[in-house]
Image (tube, helix red, strand yellow):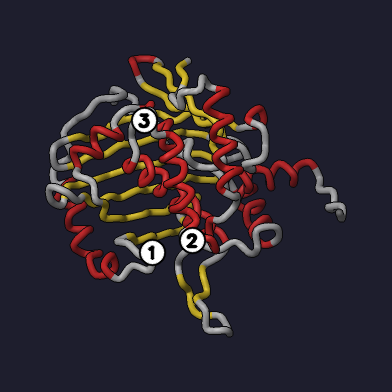
Amino acid sequence: MSSSPRLPVSWTRILAGALLLAACARVPAAPPDAAAGAAPAAPAGAAQTLRATHQRMSDKLERSSFGRPIQLDSMETPDGLQGDVYAVVDHPLSEISATLRGPAHWCDVLTLHVNNRRCTVAKGAQGRETVTLYVVRRYDKPVEDAFELPFAYRVASATPEHLSVELTAESGPLGTSNYRVTLEAVALDERKSFLHFSYSYDHNAMVRLGTMAYLATFGSEKVGFTVTGKTPEGQPDYIRGMRGLVERNAMRYFLTLDAYLSAPGADQAERRQRRWFAGAEQYPRQLHEIDLDTYLALKREDRQRDGGTGAPSSR
């Protein structure tokens, strides 16, 4: 096996940050006067606004290249990256609200991701709830090497017509900040709902430089989902670079939600894991990293280490 060139310590840390960004999601802090776990009424017109988005996207959703009604958008913001997934799902809003309200449920959701090896929930000052995720740079790294990412959990709105849940963190490791993961859902009819999942974060100039260096070298073959043209062979040419990175992460996390909604029970951990893996494998060009047996073995190890039930621990 050939040896790799030795990098200066500073660049090693920057590339470690790039790998972390390729592995995890982040979230901005809730407003200081917002009680965690509260379920206020939706802002005026929030449900109507999301329904209008569904109407505007109806043609794209019907012609989606994902094989189901999904639209994925991405952008580079002035300070970071953002990915948005819009989807019609075969779950009534009442079921989605019951399934995804509560930080423990979100621990179960987020740990479906191959790089997320542990999750804990805790109550802090004024009863605010925190979800702490333990993220490894690669799935084969031990949990002892994981970065801790503490997210503030908040139900921003919950009505029979509209749900909005936020996970936020003001700062993260290695120059990242303002993590925000948001799920918004609106009822379309008695059986279907429209979801908007948003994932964004900021990074400083050094992290951006390191991430771009990683994507230009070790990650040069990685692509996202947006088609930018055709290859000389006539195949779709997919977006690369920073937007490709955020598109892969956004889709991986949307698939965790999709898998959890399909099998929400406490005794359904392996069924959810198989569903998440199968969902990711539908897009091997973008998302394949690991074989099923290895993935299930890692998740089984995590459950056994944390008590064998698959439930998140409290601190």
In the displayed structure, does residue 7 sit left or right of residue 27? Answer: right
What percent of the width, then of the height, locates residue 86? Answer: 31, 55
**Which residue is disc 1 drawn over?**
66
Counting residues from the start of the chain, the first of labels 1 and 2 encountered is 1
> Which amino acid type is shown beneath numbered disc 2?
Tyr
Please tell me whether residue 83 is drawn above or below residue 60 in the rendered image. above
Please tell me whether residue 279 is drawn above or below residue 122 in the rendered image. below
**Which residue is disc 3 drawn over?**
105
> Which amino acid type is shown beneath numbered disc 3?
His
**Which residue is disc 2 drawn over?**
283
Badge 3 element: helix
- How many neighbours does mark 1 have within 10 angstroms: few (below 14), some (14-19), or many (20 or more)? few
Q: Nearer the viewer, residue 115 or 125?
A: 115
Counting residues from the start of the chain, the first of labels 3 and 1 encountered is 1
Quarter of the picture containing the N terminus is bottom right
* Residue depicted at x 13% and y 51%: 189
What percent of the width, then of the height, locates residue 222? Answer: 59, 61
Q: Are marks 1 and 2 in contact (CB under 8 Å)?
A: yes
User: CA separation, marks 1 and 2?
Assistant: 9 Å
Q: Nearer the viewer, residue 77 or 248?
A: 248
Counting residues from the start of the chain, the first of labels 3 and 2 encountered is 3
Q: Nearer the viewer, residue 204 or 85?
A: 85
